[in-house]
Image (cartoon, grey):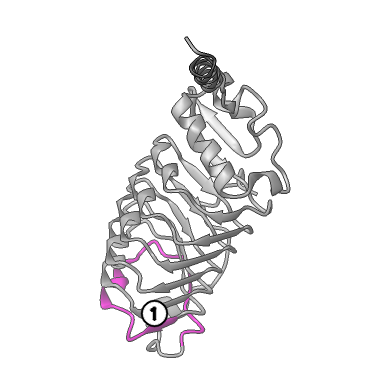
Amino acid sequence: MSLRPLLISIGIGLLLTACRSQTTPCDSVRDVPKAECAVLREFYEATDGPNWKDHRRWLESPNACEWFGVTCSDGQVTGLTMNYVNITGELPASLATLDRLEVVSLYYNNLSGGIPPELGRLENLQVLILHNNRLSGSLPPELGNLSRLSLLDLDSNDLSGPIPPEYGQLQNLEGLKLRDNRLSGDLPPQLGNLSHLQGLWLSHNDFTGDVPSEWANLTSLRMFSGYGNARLGPLPPYLASLPPDGYPSWANPNIP
């Protein structure tokens, strides 16, 4: 064999060996499935993890359940609670593959882009809090599939368009917070199906028309705010008499 083909053969062999020897931070993680670790890694990389105000143990500890903001149960990821830590970028749709997620709380960050409609696949999700970010686009109708959801808090973003009628399917919903966005259109009568709803906050948007008569069925409602919607018709007495704020039973003291 001449010298040149020999050198090429050696070079290819070294390259293949190097590729096989490459490792990722998830190769050493043992407490959650590698697929779930890969999703957490994608979340970290998509949201500028190195510049979070707190990223303790992320991609360093072999126990992903020890990474800041990550909670687990029975060896699977069940929560992401990371507030006030300067998370930027867009939420990756792959979060929807963490099918044991019960809590996603990422408020007071700098998330941008739309809310991934894929999150509607998280059948175990109970709490979704994304207020005070820079999220834009419309409210995904797919979130209406979250049958266990008790709190949906999207206050203080840049969301636009109507409230999807599919949200009337959220039979366990106790709190719906949509204040300080650019939401518009008529209020969906389907929300009158939410028999467990205790708090409904819609102020400072651009809703129009009258409050649907079906909302009289919201017999569990204890708090309501609709001010700051200049083209919304007068509130019926059963809404006008409710306080705009309070501490309802669904408030989770474990979420700071």
Q: Is residue 101 above or below residue 193?
A: above
Residue stretch in magenta: 206-229
Under mark 1, the amino acid is: Ser
Q: Is residue 7 a member of the stretch shown in magenta? A: no
Q: Position of residue 49 (x, y in %)?
A: 64, 45
Q: Position of residue 135 (x, y in %)?
A: 51, 64
Residue 77 showing in the rendered view: no
Within-10-Å neighbours for mark 1: few <14, some 14–19, many 20+: some
Q: Nearer the viewer, residue 26 or 56?
A: 26
Q: Residue at x 57, y 33 (%)?
A: 71
Q: Position of residue 212 (x, y in %)?
A: 29, 78
Q: Residue at x 67, y 28 (%)?
A: 60
Q: Residue at x 48, y 22 (%)?
A: 74
Q: Nearer the viewer, residue 97 or 220?
A: 97
User: Disc 1 on helix, strand or loop?
Assistant: strand
Q: Nearer the viewer, residue 98 or 28?
A: 28
Q: Is residue 47 above or below residue 76?
A: below
Residue 123 placement, left or right of 2: left
Q: Residue furthest front?
A: 2
Residue 212 placement, left or right of 48: left
Residue 229 showing in the rendered view: yes
- In the rendered image, which residue does mark 1 sit on? 184
Q: Position of residue 179 (x, y in %)?
A: 51, 71
Q: Is residue 216 a member of the stretch shown in magenta? A: yes
Q: Is residue 23 above or below residue 222?
A: above
What number of labels is visible? 1
Quadrant of residue 58 within the rendered picture: top right
Quadrant of residue 210 within the rendered picture: bottom left
Q: Nearer the viewer, residue 6 or 224?
A: 6
Q: Is residue 120 above or below residue 164?
A: above
